[in-house]
Amino acid sequence: MSHNTIEINKAMDKFDGRHSVWLFGYGSLIYKADFPYIERRPASIEGWTRRFWQGSHDHRGTPEAPGRVATIVPQPGAVCHGMAYLVTPEEFAHLDHREKNGYLRLAIDIHFDEEHSEEGLVYIATADNAAFLGEATELDIAQHIAAAVGPSGPNAEYLLHLAQALRELGHHDEHVFTIERHLRQLRGG
Ligand code: SIN
């Protein structure tokens, strides 16, 4: 699959005709909402875990020197915490452009609390996209992130903002926090 997913996402018609759709964010969408939304609520998805396995050619790196950003991978029993936004379908043109580097829209159950969930969308970068980098140790990921920079700024900023946002939401993510620890050591504090 090409790493530009705009056309594939445009063809996704599952929520056509709806006035609003819930979008679940687990990476930069948690801390950077550069789109209007009707409502925003902490939420989670089940059976997925956050991993810094996706390459970034357009935001936190370049095609020659990609950065490393978050995607989600299936893991039975796991819960991935993030932020859900209720948006109008018009927002998806902007979102598809923002997430064009390998991310596909996927319909998913979004949980708000034990009794309440709704079907919505998440952007996911799977192993078959051309920008996917895959598994590495948290130390290797931190070293990679420390060196990368792209049009949206240093790759380290993405990781550190995400770690801070998760902390503010009250959620521990061992993968993210271990990378953060290594990154801070590499940066000297
Ligand atoms: C997300 O945040 O949900 C998708 C990945 C990203 O934009 O960082």
Image (cartoon, rainbow, N blue to C red):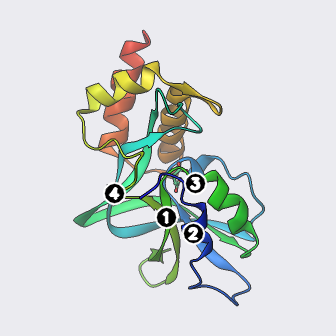
How far is the residue under mark 3 from the one under mark 4? 14 Å
Q: Earlier in the sequence, mark 1 or mark 2?
A: 2
Residue type beneath disc 3: Lys
Instruction: Give the SS element for disc 3.
Output: loop
Mark on residue 146?
A: none
Residue type beneath disc 1: Leu
140 vs 26, left or right, is: left
Q: Earlier in the sequence, mark 3 or mark 4?
A: 3
Look at the image and tell me in which quarter the C terminus lies: top left
Against 170, residue 162 (above or below) is above
Mark on residue 104?
A: 1
What residue sits right under mark 2 in the picture? 9
How far is the residue under mark 1 from the one under mark 2? 6 Å
Residue type beneath disc 2: Asn
Instruction: Give the SS element for disc 2.
Output: helix
The residue that appears at 62% across and 71% down in the rendered structure is: 10
